[in-house]
Amino acid sequence: MTIGEFQFCASAIMGLLSASLVIASRYTNKAGKIYNKSLWILTAGTILLTVHFGLQYYFKFRSNGQMEECVFLNILLVQPAAWFISLSVLYLLRNGHVHRWEYFTGFLFYIVSLAVILVSYLSNEKLLSLHHAGIAASAIYGSMLLFLYLQEFNLIRHLNMILDNFYDCCSKEMTRWIKNTVSLLAILALFSPIFIFMENAIFLTSFAFLILFFVFYYAFNFICFGISENASVLYRANEEEEKERITLPAKMKDENGRNHKRVEAAIRHWMKAQGHLKTGITIQDAVDEMRIPRYLLTQWIRNTEYEVFSKWIAHLRVEEAKQLMTAHPDYSNEAVAKECGFSSRCYFQKVFRDLTGMTPREFQSQCNKNAKP
């Protein structure tokens, strides 16, 4: 495949991806305003990439060896596209709270990058060669993107903590695609100064293919995330966390277990009603059924070895699974997972092994051996 043919295909793929994002917006209303705005920011990035590859194909800058025009087009369109894509991640992770200075800083770095290229071009490379200007401009903007990605990594860790203390299953599976996206885009930002002047067709096509793959991976998972219930769970978890942080009485930090007995009594009553065996529950669902304030249960869990809601629920369900498998050794893993509130057989097996050090099958075999006279 020639460079021109690849550019045409890349433009078509990005165009179809942009159209898919627009269509997907009609089916993600339940995901919330934060998600939908992130989706439109991402769409702006894919549209810029569509235009970029289309112009590269139409003018044939690479094929004709016009590196100056090619580099300028990269700085003009690819950099803001990368900015929009990274901003969509940041907007989603921050629950819409992106500071004005972050918008302004991205725009400022973009202007500086363009200025470096224009100074070199207008001065006929007397002040700075176009080759070095392109590398400098790409490095300037790449450093900005890397700074954003470091922020996003910290936000992902914080988000996992919020989700683990809100939802009944491990949050890492829910946010793994975001972490992968941030990692992949950071790699692109790091190596873009090296590849911007690459003339070898194989290396250049390979790098462009990686860009397409990473963007497609992010957009595809982004759409799936919005169509599923995960986006609404994320939005609700952030909202509830913010409410709790604002309304949590300061005196609760120094109560030292004054409501310990009250919480334990509520938990016993809730477990007796098998509230912990319902699939897909949140900590808010639990405290509503227990009829206690959320901050009391949160504080109680933090004082245990489990620390967060998801780990505590996993422990309760695994203990229930042990009793069920001991009483019914003929039960399959699917049946046990369903009875004990796990979302799937695979998740049940993973959690069971993490907490007990053995698989459900190994536990059943051990129970059968102990039951023999």
Image: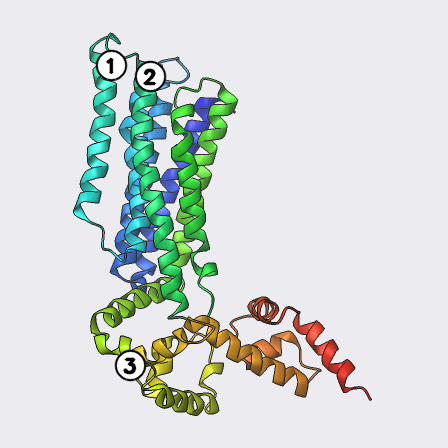
Q: Report the amino acid beneath label 1.
A: Ser
Return the disc, 2 or 3, that comes first in the chain's sequence. 2
Number of numbered markers: 3
* Rendered position, 122 above or below 316: above
Of 258 and 210, nearer the camera is 258
* Outermost residue toward the right in this view: 373
Side of 99 relative to 214 (left or right): left
Q: Report the amino acid beneath label 3.
A: Glu
Q: Which residue is mark 1?
A: 120
Side of 51 relative to 211 (left or right): left
Of 159 and 307, nearer the camera is 307
Residue 11, x across and y down, in percent:
38, 33
Does residue 226 show up?
Answer: no
Q: CA distance from mark 1 to mark 3?
A: 66 Å
Residue contact between numbered discs 1 and 2, judged by CB atoms under 8 Å: yes
Return the disc, 1 or 2, that comes first in the chain's sequence. 1
Residue 248, x across and y down, in percent:
24, 74
Does residue 207 show up?
Answer: yes
Residue 21, x across and y down, in percent:
34, 49
Residue 372, picture quadrant:
bottom right
Q: Secondary structure at mark 2?
A: helix
* Rendered position, 366 above or below 214: below
Q: Badge 3 local density, few (<14 within 10 Å), some, or many (20+)?
A: few
Q: Report the amino acid beneath label 2.
A: His
**Residue displayed at 42% across by 30% down:** 191
Instruction: Name the mark nearer the viewer: 2 or 3.
Output: 3
Q: CA distance from mark 2 to mark 3?
A: 63 Å
Return the disc, 1 or 3, that comes first in the chain's sequence. 1
Q: Quadrant of the C terminus?
A: bottom right
Instruction: Give the numbered dot on residue 255.
Output: 3
Instruction: Give the numbered dot on residue 132.
Output: 2
